[in-house]
Amino acid sequence: MADAMDRKHGRRRGPGPAKGSRRLAVLVVFVLVVLAVAAFALTR
């Protein structure tokens, strides 16, 4: 999955893995928040 994202951005293995992992962490947190809000809205 990471390889596909890197290919879409057109650059392989940037200067360091820190930026990529931080972006991935933000994406994961965002998805978790969206799922939590959706579950809360559906179960209300």
Image: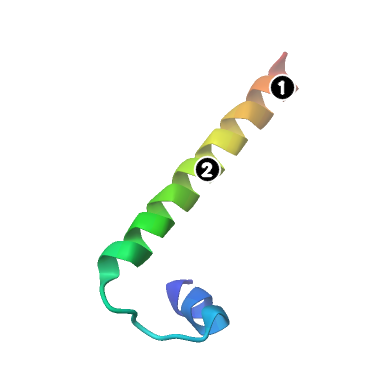
Residue at position x 27%, y 70% in the image: 17
- Mark 1 crowdedness (10 Å alpha carbons): few <14, some 14-19, many ≥20: few
**Where does residue 1 sit, x and y in percent of width and height?**
48, 71
Of 2 and 13, which appears nearest the observer?
13
Q: CA distance from mark 1 to mark 2?
A: 16 Å
Please report whichever mark, 1 or 2, sits nearer to the chain's N-terminal start: 2
**Where does residue 2 sit, x and y in percent of width and height?**
44, 72
Residue at position x 39%, y 51% in the image: 25
Quarter of the image where one finds residue 8: bottom right
Name above or below for residue 36 compared with residue 6.
above
Which coloring applies here?
rainbow
- Number of marks in picture: 2
The image's mark for residue 16 is none
Quarter of the image where one finds residue 21: bottom left
Mark 1 or mark 2: which is in front?
2
Q: Quadrant of the C terminus?
A: top right
Relative horizontal placement of residue 20, taking residue 42 as reference (left or right): left
Quarter of the image where one finds residue 34: top right
Kindly identify which residue carries mark 2: 30
Amino acid tagged 2: Phe
**Where does residue 31 sit, x and y in percent of width and height?**
55, 44
Amino acid tagged 1: Ala
Residue at position x 52%, y 86% in the image: 10
Q: Secondary structure at mark 1?
A: helix
Kindly identify which residue carries mark 1: 41
Q: Secondary structure at mark 2?
A: helix
Name above or below for residue 27 compared with residue 6.
above
List the single residue furthest toward the top: 44
Relative horizontal placement of residue 37, taking residue 28 as reference (left or right): right
Relative horizontal placement of residue 9, taking residue 14 as reference (left or right): right
